[in-house]
Image (cartoon, grey):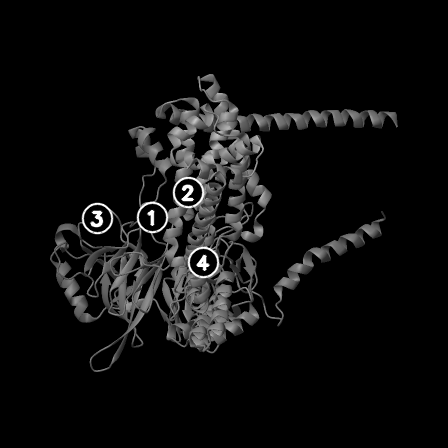
Amino acid sequence: MTVKKTKRLMAFMCVLILMPMSLANAAEDGAHSTYTYNYDYWEDIRESPDAYRVAAVIRSSDLDLGGTDLSAPQSLFALDDKLYIADRGNNRIVELTRKGQDFICTRIIDHAVVPDDLREEFLKDTDLMLAENGRRYRDEAGNLYLKPAANSSAELGPMILTPEGITNLNTPNDMAVVVMKDEDGTETRYMWIADTNNNRVLKIDITGDEPVFVRQFVKPTDATFDQNQAFLPNKIVVDSSGRVFVQATNINKGLVKFESDATFTGFIGANQVVYNLWDYIWKTFFTTKEQRSQQASFVPTEYQNIYIDKNGFIYATNISFSEYDLLYDNAKPIRRLNAVGTDILIKNDHYPPIGDLKWVEQSTDHGPSKFYDITVLDNDMYMAIDRTRGRIFGYDPQGIMLWAFGMSGVSSDGSFNRAVSIEHMGYDLLVLDELDCSVTVFTPTEYGNLIYQASEEYLDGQYDQSAETWQEVMKYNPNYTLAIIGIGRSEMREAAELSTTQERIAKYADAMEHFKNAHDRENYGRAFRYYRKEWVEQNIWWIVLIVAALLVVPVIKRSVQKIKWEVAAYESRQVHK
Amino acid sequence: MSLVKSISKTKTRKEHPRMRRYLDSLKYAKYVIFHPFDGFWDLVHEKRGTLGAAHTFLAAFLLTYVMKLMYTSFQFNGAPIHYINVYERIASLLLPFLVLCIANWALSTLFDGKGRFKDIYMAMCYALVPYVIIQIPLILLSNILTFDEGSFYNVLDVISLVWCAFLAFVGLMEVHDYGPGKTIVFIIATIFGALVILFLLLVFFSLLSDAFGFFVSIYREIVFRLS
């Protein structure tokens, strides 16, 4: 083979190898594909049209952030047209305002002014202790370090006050904003900040230009809270009445719950201890006390992230579990906690919402999906972001997977290096990348919008419209289970209104066929029950006839036999006479 | 009265004695499944069973299994119908069945079990009869019941398996003339024995293929040198 030939062959092979990549990258309309897929009944991957496309990537450098770029941002919070980013590395919260697909920085919150009366109260309370054990001292820069007495009634907690009377943030990891209305209709915009290294959750009033200190939620003095542990709030959610739920580092009893007036009211939703039988036997019978004290004990794990939906249910994600735990759904990576902390997530699919069901074992990013954040849309569908493979998984309120899309590592739009947070604005999804310091905005495609529309119409009780919308979805993706079930359901309803038995039977059979294709046994059973009823009514005379025949035939047979015997006996008697 | 008898007798068709014995042994299964203790004893020790009937029951069992996979209503059928390989499914039942029979025979011969291999095989085949007589109506039933009424189906499904297991247990007890405790011990030992047989088979075949490969390479070497 000549050199030229070899070169040509190699070039050809390169083209062959690269071609599918370039083809896959660009969808039919030329936009960037997000590699959307779903799992079928047999847990095989089915590729699907894109449900979401990248609309914009907001990079830190594109924003006017007062000269400092984002540094290790941790969390997103969206409220109406405002998007808040916890800029941990710069000890500040950045507020962006959305105009169409453009985001502009409208505010930077890095401190709160402590009002005079509060400061007075604070100083009064700490003043008495000054001499004994230094609860209050001033450093060279003039900052005042305050620590109230243990028996102090005002739960103000420790605080560092600058000479100007303001308190600064220290590594804020998360925030939440709630707009509260007074009786007279004035709106106040409150923000809660998980001010981690200040060991507090800070509540500030951001209605005006200057953020004003309202209250801080500090380490509970309650006996159930381990006093040797530092209080390091990591993720927070706030319900509409101002109750605060904190996921704190090193606290494995569940979420720390505070009332709106900062009183600690206990833990909710402790993660159950997960261990397998073999570990238990090994640790109980085959290890000495000394060995056991060296090993990790069975302790419940912390949640990774939390989100509160519009009904006040907390969605929590959990990433510390082994692949084995997924097998019997012990891991429960996504939970929906009610007021007493019980997991009430609905799981009506053939597999629970755990992200990827399959992965290539030899690849660098193998292992189960680990959900670092979750967001719940207004229609109760929830989207979780997986860090293992940088994918976003969408589930409907019944726990049925809608889609998965996205990827990690590749430096193109719609892929993540280290996604830490997901939020939504309407149907748009926003994903924060900690390393890229960027926010990726996904907007639903026609296909995605149709799925949302059909589901919402169904929940609203507009069944016929919903079926029509599902038909539209089927045009995009004939393998979409939800669409097939939706059509089956509408056929079942239509059948009841048909006039002739013949038509009804045919319609129920159609519905059954659809449910069978979707492997939906319960709905199939429902359709089959009607089908059976109609069928029996139509064929009742045949059934009666067959049953009668089965009863009558043996009787006739027996009497015929009897007559024959009698005839034969009579004849033989005649012969012997 | 004798007259009536003579009339009815003339009416029965003439049958080959072997055929007759075969049919009788088929019918005897009814007695075995309802009176297992007596039934299995007579099956083997009174020569009431035949190998032909045993083969028939085994074949019927395998056929029922396949029919269950293919014709059970979708509501109660978890089998991936479009992926099923019928021969593979049959083999995955038949081979363990035979290996377990062999293992049981091999072990019980060493510990004064009375049963010969033929007896064990026959008893095991007769023990499969309830599966056939329950599962075939169950296939029809599954096409009439809805998903919500599935408990009827599941109960019968479980009964068929439990009955078979009980018959297999009693069958082994009677064939070997063991007590119940010894039978349990031997059932466990049989499972281990089957694993040993499988291991030996694997070793044997891998050695065989190595030996075969060795001669093939010698042949290739010779051909290469000569040409």
Taking the spot 29% from the left edge, 49% from the top edge, the residue there is A252
Looking at this rendering, what residue extends furthest in the front direction? Answer: A577
Q: Is A555 in front, or is A482?
A: A555
Which residue is denoted by mark 4 in the rendering? A549
Q: Which residue is mark 2?
A: B160
Q: Which amino acid is tagged 4?
A: Ala
**Disc 1 vs disc 2: Cβ atoms closer than 8 Å?**
no
The disc at residue A301 is 1
Q: Which mark sits nearer the N-terminus, 1 or 3?
A: 3
Q: Nearer the viewer, mark 1 or mark 2?
A: 2
Q: Is residue A46 visible?
A: yes
Chain letter, disc 4 residue: A
Q: Residues within 10 Å of mark 2 (few under 14, many from 20)?
A: some
Location of residue A541 by image quarter: bottom left
Could you tell which of marks 4 and 3 lies nearer the N-terminus? 3
Instruction: Find disc 3 in the rendering and name its residue.
Output: A227
Q: CA distance from mark 1 to mark 3?
A: 19 Å
